[in-house]
Amino acid sequence: AVLADPFSVQLHGVLRHPPRDGEPALVYGCGTLGLMTVAMLRHLHPRTPVWAVARYQHQAQAARALGAAEVLPSRPAALIERVAQLAGATPLRPWNGLPWLMRGAGVIYETVGSPSTIETSMRIAAPRARIVVSGVEAPRRFEWTPYYFKELSLVGSNAFAIEEFEGERRHAMEIYFELVRRGLDLSSLITHRFELAEYRRAFLGMHDHGRSSAIKSVFAW
């Protein structure tokens, strides 16, 4: 039940902007939201190749276990080169800045929301691809030439409500529990459990999840 809310947040974006047949879907970020996106794509679109961008080893392992076909490095230069290999693209190398591609992911679910990751998403997206942003960070300037040059769609995805699913309008949490009933199992994402009195250790572990290997922490009482 504690996973219903974050799952529903990502479900809203995936249902509004599903992958098209045959196009790879890239999930940028492998925290709770990103890993849930990997899992729901494998359940709702089993023939879609899912590429996941992970920063830490424990995230990469979780992404593979949930069905990611490829786990990609998070450093922008290395990520661009790897997507170029997967998509069969020749990187375009400007005089300044990072390369960008004219073949890449058809839809990107951006769960980080930083200027750097949004910019990199634009560089690795296919022409006329969709970048669905659910991550949130303070705004800063970034290079957005690929945005207009490739005619990309950059869309926000906020919260959840009544969604269209299998021809019916249902609440997102109701859809989550239906998918659980059908076999969706995200329990592996709950990596840490704490007593309420341990709240300081819980918050520190989530803040430094590279060291703690935390994905989703919960309080038990």
Image (spheres, rainbow, N blue to C red):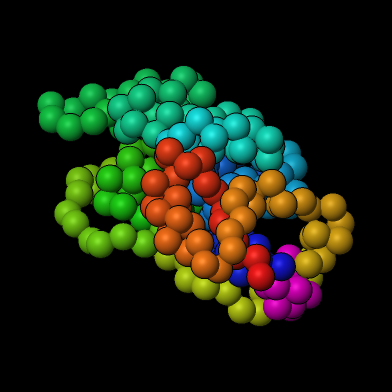
Looking at the figure, which quarter contains the C terminus? bottom right
Where 49 falls versus 40 (above or below)? above
Report x, y in % for residue 151: 36, 50
Instruction: State the residue in front, 13 or 54.
Output: 54
Report x, y in % for residue 165: 74, 68
Instruction: State the residue in front, 54 or 12.
Output: 54
Q: Residue at x 42, y 61 (%)?
A: 200
Res. 195 image quadrant: bottom right
Residue 175: in magenta span: yes
Would residue 35 appear left or right of 119 to someone viewing this image?
right
Q: Residue at x 64, y 33 (%)?
A: 64
Q: Residue at x 78, y 67 (%)?
A: 177
Residue 92: in magenta span: no
* Residue 78 in view, yes or no: yes
Res. 126 image quadrant: top left
Instruction: State the residue in front, 5 or 88.
Output: 5
Where 106 falls versus 74 (above or below)? below
Residue interval drawn in magenta: 168-176
Would residue 205 appear left or right of 49 to someone viewing this image?
left
Q: Residue furthest left?
A: 95
Q: Residue furthest right?
A: 182
Would residue 64 appear left or right of 143 to someone viewing this image?
right
Would residue 141 appear left or right of 112 to someone viewing this image?
left
Looking at the figure, which quarter contains the N terminus? bottom right
